Amino acid sequence: RPEGRPTGNADVPDQVAVERVRAGARDSYAVLVRRHAAAAHRAAVIFGAGPDAEDVVQVAFVKAFEALPRCRDGAAFRPWFLRIVINEAKNARRSASRRWSATERLATLDVPLDGPDPATSTLSGERRAELMAAIRRLPVPHQRVVACRFLLELDERETATALGLPAGTVKSRLHRALRRLQRELSPDVGVVEHEH
């Protein structure tokens, strides 16, 4: 989805809402909260917040609001904000001494979104389970890239921002992850093709 595209009842692009908040219109922040809350919650769960996901999202929205004046002009809000969510989720996991593996987190992921998972919406339950099991077998760094790219619907540049990685690292990890998934899955499951 293009950054800042109007969604729901809000007709203001992200960048306009950010500029309004910076200019003192604090109520414009509600547009960003409504638009990105579901993705933020999903990211919090994927990156280990567990039952603290709601708290993580609330803290991330507060921190993002406070940090907006320091956000680079013209920077896309969604990946910048999701990086804050991911960092908060990791902090929550550490502070609670959780030892959930990335595999367990993905196995328990069941977060309602505004729409179906783009990567698995056409798959039956059995095929979806096979795909998720294959994702869980990936190395953790590859799981994170696949999760951002397909479960959070970020493009490669946005994934790099959200994970704090160089774009080339994201591209190579994604390429290796998708090649492995294609080798492991039966032909009728299918994997979303990598963008070049």
Image: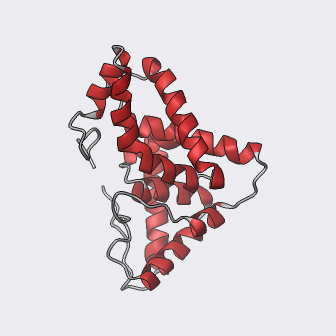
Q: Extreme left residue here? A: 11
Total count of labels: 0
Instruction: Give the residue at the far top of this rendering.
Output: 23
Question: Which is nearer the eye, 161 or 170?
Answer: 161
Where on the picture, by quarter, is residue 11? Answer: top left
Q: Is residue 51 above or below residue 57?
A: below
Q: Which sits in the foreground, 95 or 138? A: 95
Is residue 143 found left or right of 126 in the rendered image? right
Q: Residue at coordinates 52% horizontally, 29% vertically from top-left?
A: 62
The answer to which of 16 and 135 lies nearer the viewer is 16
Pick the quarter of the image with the C terminus. bottom left
Residue 177 locus on image (x, y percent): 49, 64
* 59 to the left or right of 98: left
Res 194 seen here: yes
Q: Is residue 166 visible?
A: no
Residue displayed at 48% across by 62% down: 176
Residue 132 sits above or below residue 52 on the image = below
Please provide percent x and percent y for residue 14.
30, 33
Residue 129, above or below 140 = below
Horizontally, residue 176 falls left or right of residue 121, namely: right
Q: Position of residue 58 (x, y in %)?
A: 54, 38
For the point 30% across and 27% down, the residue is 17
Residue 33, image x and y in percent? 40, 38
